[in-house]
Amino acid sequence: MSGVPTLEDDKLDLAAAKAAGWSSEDLEWEIKQERAAAHLRAQDLTQAGNFWQDGLELARAHFAENDPRLGTSLANAAYGLRAAGNNSLADSRFAESLRVWSGYGLWIQAMPLDQRARSSLFHLRMELKHRDQYEKTARERLRRFGEESHKAIVELAAGGPPLLRGLERWRAEKPATFSERRKFLSACLLLVSRPE
C-alpha cells in the first residue's frame, strides 16, 4: 500500500516496545510521525499535518521538555502550519523547536547506549573489550545526526525547504531494539523531509 505500518505491525511492535520498557506513547509517537511522512510523500499535506499535530499533543503531554522528539514534533507541526498559511504560529513553534533542539548534546551524553554488535560473537567481544571507544564513536555518530537535524530546523524556520531524506532513510537506520538510541534517531530522521 503506502508503506504505512498496519495495525498488526503496531500490535507486534507495542508488545516488544513494552517489554523493553517503552510506554505506549513512545511507540505511538513514532507511528504518527511515520504516517505523517507517508502522507507527505503521497502529497497529502492536510493529513500529514493532522498526524503532526496529534504527535505534538502527545509529545507535550508525555515527553520531557528537553526530549528531541518534542522538538521534532514542534518543527513538523510548524511546517504544516506554515504550509496552511498560519505563519505567526508556525514561527512560534519553530522557535520553541530550536530551543528544545539546542540541548540535544546533553541528551546524547546522558543516553545509555545498548550493545549493537550483531554480526558475530567476535564483534560482540570486541565491543565489550573496547567499550569506551565504542561509546565515544557511537555518541559522535549520534551527535552528527543531531547536528544535521538542528541545522535542518534552522533552515526550515528561515523558510527553506525540508531536507531530502525521506521515510526510506528512517527505515534503513531504525534500530531493531526499542532503546533510547531509537528514540533519538526517530527525532532526527522523522523530521519533515521532501518527498523523494
Image (cartoon, grey):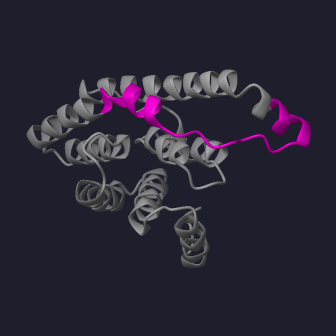
Judged left or right of residue 56, residue 22 is right
Q: From the viewer's perspective, is 134 left or right of 22?
A: right
106 drawn magenta: yes
Q: Nearer the viewer, residue 119 or 132?
A: 132
Q: Quadrant of the C terminus?
A: top right
Range drawn in magenta: 101-126
Q: Determine whether 184 is above or below 101 in the image.
A: below
Examine the rendered structure and indicate whether residue 87 appears above or below residue 37.
Answer: above
* Image quarter of the N terminus: bottom right
Give the quadrant of residue 172: top right
Along the horizontal axis of the image, is 186 left or right of 121? left
Please give the name of the residue rendered at 71% of the width and 41% of the height, measured from the top-left corner. Answer: 116
Instruction: Farthest residue to the front: give it.
Output: 129
Residue 135 image offset from top left, x and y in percent: 62, 27
**Quarter location, residue 36:** bottom left
Viewed as shown, does residue 134 lie left or right of 109? Answer: right
Residue 43 included in the magenta stretch of the image = no
Q: Position of residue 139 (x, y in %)?
A: 56, 27
Q: Does residue 72 appear in this view?
A: yes
Total number of numbered labels?
Answer: 0
Quadrant in the picture for residue 68:
top left
What residue occupies the far left of the structure in this picture? Answer: 88
Task: Tell me which residue sits at (29%, 59%) in the image.
Answer: 62
**Residue 42 appears in view:** no
Place of residue 61 in the rendered image (x, y in percent of width and height, measured from the top left): 23, 60
The residue shown at (68%, 21%) is 133
- Measuring 58% from the left and 39% from the top, which residue is drawn there? 113
Q: Is residue 130 above or below residue 183?
A: above
Judging depth in this view, the residue of 179 and 53 nearest the camera is 179
Estimate the x, y position of residue 193 in percent, counting from the top left: 44, 39
